[in-house]
Image (tube, grey):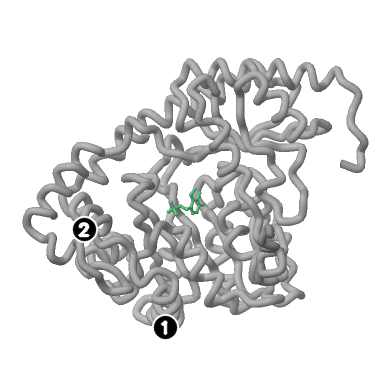
Amino acid sequence: MATQWTDHWAARTQHLKASSIRELLKLTARPEVISFAGGLPATETLPAQAIAEACDRILKTQADRALQYGPTEGYLALRGHIADMYRARGVPATADNVLITTGSQQGLDLIGRVLIGKGTPVVTEAPTYIGALQAWLVSEPAMTGIPLDDDGMRIDLIDLNQRINLLYALPNFQNPSGVSLSMERREKLVDMAHRERFVIIEDDPYRALRYSGEDLPALLEIEAARLGANWDSDGRIIHLGTFSKIMAPGLRVGWVIAPTTALRMLALAKQGADLHSAMLSQYIAEELLREGIIEGNYPLLVRIYRERRDTMLAALEEHLTGLAEWTKPQGGLFIWVKVPGVDAHDLLAKALERNLAFVPGDNFFFDGRGRDAMRLNFSCMPPDRIREGVARLGALLAEARHEPLASPAR
Ligand code: PMP
C-alpha cells in the first residue's frame, strides 16, 4: 500500500515554498540554454588552484583538527580574521561576536528559529531575497513588504504605527533588484531601528562586487560609529556575510556578526541544526584569507562581472527599449526588469522553448506580486551569450506585446 505521506507532514510544511530558481537550475543545466536564472559565480573566478594547495597543506599538517568535530561557533582563527576585517572598519568586534555558519543561508535560518515566531512583525524589501522567505515563512510571521526605488528601500513608507520586531535589509546590490540603499537612507534606517527599537538583519554578500560608484559603509559600521564602546551591549543589528561570492559557494562558509547576547542564542540554535560548519572548509577559508588570496581575487571578479553587467545593460538598451524598464546596478549579480502588461511566467514558458531562462519576479514576493517582472543574472554567461540571450528576450517581448493581454485579474 502506498504510504500516505500527507498524513505525516508537520503543519509547518504548508508554508514551505519551493524555490523555482532551484527547479529552473535543473532545466538550465543543458549547455545550449542561455541561463540568466541562477545567481552563481562565474566558474573561471573560483580559486581552484589556491584551494587545492591550501587543502594539501592543511591535510598534511593539521588533519587532526581539520577533519575532526569542532566548536559550534566555528574555527577560532577564522572568527578572529573576520572580526579583524570589521574592526578595520570601525566595528569593535572580537571573535566572540562572530559565528561561522554553513553559508549565510544558515544564518537566515538560525535567525528564523531564534527571532521569528507565529505573528512576529517582520519588514522586508519587496521584492526580497527568496532564501530569506523560504527560511522564515514556515514560522508564519506577519510580513510587510516595502517597495524599492533607485535608492533602495523606501524607508519613508515604513508604517511606524505598527509594531516592528525585525527588519531585513540588503543594502548593497540587493538580490533580486540590484539596487543599493543610499547613504542618507542607511543613516536614517539605523536611527529608526534605535528609536523604534527593532532589530535589523543586514545581509551583505555582494559588497566586494562593486563595479562603479563609491563603497558605502554597512549599517553595522554606521551603528558601531554611533555606539562606540557600547556597541556590544546596545547594538541591534545582526549582520550576515559569506565567502560564497568571493571564494566558492560550494565550500558553504558564511558568518554572522552580532552583539554577544544575540550571538550566543544563534549558536545554541546552530547546535541543533548541524553541530558546526565543516571544519575543512573553515580551515581553507582561513588560509586563503590569511594569505590575501581572497582579496587578491577581487580585481578579477570585478573585471569579469563589470564587463558582463555593461554588456547586459547595453543589450537591454538595444533590444528592450520601449518594451521594458530595468535597474542599473552598481554591483552584484542581478538586474531587475519590469515588463508591464506581460506575464513573466507565460514569457518564461516561451523563453524555455528557445533555450532562454530567467526567474519570474513573483518568486521574490511573499504575496504573489511581481508577475510583471523578472530577475536577470549576468555573472554566469560570457558576453556573447548575454547579447544573444537579451536579443531573444527582446524578440519574445515584442511578440508578447502583439498578443491580446491575458485577463487583468492575473
Ligand atoms: N543572502 C543573499 C542576499 C543571497 O543572494 C544569497 C545567495 N544567493 C545568500 C544570502 C545565501 O548565500 P550562501 O548561503 O551561499 O552564503
Nearer the observer, 7 or 58: 7
Q: Which mark is residue 283?
A: 2
- Residue 220 coordinates in the image, percent (x, y): 44, 65
Amino acid type shown at disc 1:
Thr
In the image, residue 245 sits, relative to residue 133, either above or below, namely above
- Measure the alpha-carbon separation of dots 1 and 2: 26 Å
* Pointer 1 local density, CA inside 10 Å: few below 14, some 14–19, many at least 20: few
Labels 1, 2: front one: 2
* Pointer 2 local density, CA inside 10 Å: few below 14, some 14–19, many at least 20: many
Nearer the observer, 353 or 39: 353
Would residue 327 be seen by someone viewing this image from the given angle? no
The answer to which image quadrant residue 359 occupies is: top right
The secondary element bearing badge 1 is classed as helix
The N terminus lies in quadrant? bottom right
The secondary element bearing badge 2 is classed as helix
Circle 1 is placed at which residue position? 261
Q: Would residue 378 be found to the left or right of residue 100 on screen? A: right
Would residue 125 be seen by someone viewing this image from the given angle? yes
Tell me what residue is drawn at x 30 percent, y 32 percent: 300
In the image, residue 128 sits, relative to residue 311, either above or below, namely below
* Residues at marks 1 and 2 touching, judged by CB atoms closer than 8 Å: no
Q: Earlier in the sequence, mark 1 or mark 2?
A: 1
Q: Which mark is residue 137?
A: none
